[in-house]
Structure formats: structure tokens, C-alpha cells
Image: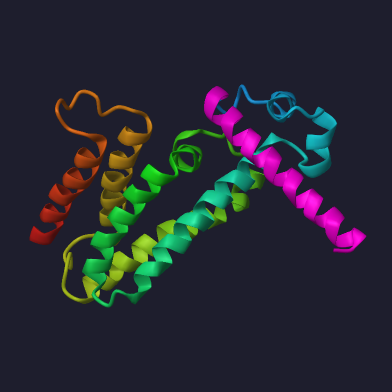
């Protein structure tokens, strides 16, 4: 490995170290109480090192946000091989649930840690719109096959997303303890199965 390649590798490794440290700080403190300084403290480097790689905490947050959605969309794309759109829709919910179980930190940052976006920064979250578009297009496919044909696409998309997200959010925020004698996995998977049963009647 030449000098240029080694320096590039070291730069990428440092960026990833910053992102990994920032993820912990954002989850612990929330967006408002996170600073470049306490991200630097988390990884035992000076704040100047952080500023060398990122202009501010918003850029770091958006990078983490996009990482999570890229990972999620990659898992959604696996379902493209399923021909029946309704079967694909049902499987999509389980993919999202499994994602929340396996990547709880990412899920919290993507959906549950609030960042006060400025108007000029909204394009930085375009990849989130791609995930929503994937769900919306899948519902449209279902409607073309005769399912949900009398339902408004936007309202139905919102309802289905809300149900899927609600299951994952309750898990990620540890709000499932009120359901006695049921494990998180049972609640998420069997609860989603009940929701699917309702969709099948629609």
C-alpha cells in the first residue's frame, strides 16, 4: 500500500471512529445537547480533529441518518425477488422489525432522535424519502392487483407505516414491559401477524 492509499485509509477509519462515537453521544444526550466537543471526548480526540472531517454536528447526524437508511433500503431490495406485491408488503414489515431488533441504535437515530432541520438542509434527508417511496409504490402495486382498491394511497401508506413503525418504536424505547408474560420478540412478531391478518381482510 502506497502513502496516498494509506492516508486515505486512515482518513476513512477516523471518519468511522467519529461516526461510531457520535452515534453513542446522540443517543445518550439527544440532538440538542450533543456538541462537537463531547463527541471528541467520547473518542478521546480534540474537537479540532472532528472539525477536520465534519463541519458541524448536523453533518455528522445526517451521515449517520443516511447510513441507516442505506442499510435498510439494501434489505428492502432483497424483497424485489418476491413477485406477489402483497406478499412482498407483508415481508417488508418483518424486514423493518428485524432491522429494529438488529440495529436498535440506527433505528433510534433514524426515527426517534429529533433534529431541528433548517429549510436549507432538507435535501440531506432525501434518502429517507426513498424508503417511503418504496413502501408507497409497493402499496400501489397491491392496488393494481385488486387489493385496497377503494382506499386512498397516501392515507393507506401512512396507516401501514404508522403500524410498522409503532411496533419498532415501542421495542426501541423499551415500552413493552406492560405486556406481561410476553417477550419482545413475541410481541413484535405476533403483534405484526395480527396487523397482517387485518390487511388480508381489506
Horizontal side of 184 relative to 112 (left or right) equals: left
Judge whether residue 22 is colored magenta: yes
The answer to which quarter of the image holds residue 149 is bottom left
Residue, x 74% and y 28% (percent of image)? 40
Where residue 140 appears, as percent x and y from the top left, is 29, 69
Judge whether residue 15 is colored magenta: yes
Instruction: Residue 144: tell me if it is visible.
Output: yes
Q: Which residues are magenta?
A: 1-29
Residue, x 11% and y 53% (percent of image)? 198
Work out which quarter of the rendered image holds the C terminus and state it: bottom left
Residue, x 68% and y 45% (percent of image)? 16
Horizontal side of 189 relative to 13 (left or right) equals: left
Horizontal side of 153 relative to 37 (left or right) equals: left
Where residue 179 appears, as percent x and y from the top left, is 17, 27
Where residue 92 appears, as percent x and y from the top left, is 31, 59
Camera-nearest residue between 202 and 26: 26
Horizontal side of 88 relative to 4 (left or right) equals: left
Work out which quarter of the rendered image holds the N terminus and state it: bottom right
Secondary structure predominantly adopted by residues drawn in magenta: helix
Amino acid at each position: 500500500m502506497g502513502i496516498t492509499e494509506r492516508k486515505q485509509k486512515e482518513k476513512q477509519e477516523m471518519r468511522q471512529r467519529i461516526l461510531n462515537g457520535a452515534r453513542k453521544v446522540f443517543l445518550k444526550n439527544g440532538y440538542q445537547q450533543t456538541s462537537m466537543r463531547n463527541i471528541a471526548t467520547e473518542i478521546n480526540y480534540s474537537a479540532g480533529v472532528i472539525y477536520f472531517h465534519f463541519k458541524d454536528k448536523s453533518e455528522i447526524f445526517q451521515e449517520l441518518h443516511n447510513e441507516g437508511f442505506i442499510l435498510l433500503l439494501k434489505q428492502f431490495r432483497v424483497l424485489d425477488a418476491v413477485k406477489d406485491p402483497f406478499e412482498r408488503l407483508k415481508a417488508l414489515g418483518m424486514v423493518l422489525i428485524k432491522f429494529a431488533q438488529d440495529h436498535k441504535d440506527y433505528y433510534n437515530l433514524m426515527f426517534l432522535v429529533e433534529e431541528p432541520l433548517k429549510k436549507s438542509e432538507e435535501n440531506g434527508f432525501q434518502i429517507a424519502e426513498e424508503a417511503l417511496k418504496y413502501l408507497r409504490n409497493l402499496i400501489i402495486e397491491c392496488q393494481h392487483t385488486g387489493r385496497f382498491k377503494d382506499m386512498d394511497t397516501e392515507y393507506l401508506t401512512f396507516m401501514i407505516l404508522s403500524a410498522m413503525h409503532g411496533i419498532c418504536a415501542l421495542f426501541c424505547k423499551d415500552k413493552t414491559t406492560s405486556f406481561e408474560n410476553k417477550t419482545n420478540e413475541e410481541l413484535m412478531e405476533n403483534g405484526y401477524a395480527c396487523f397482517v391478518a387485518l390487511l388480508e381482510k381489506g
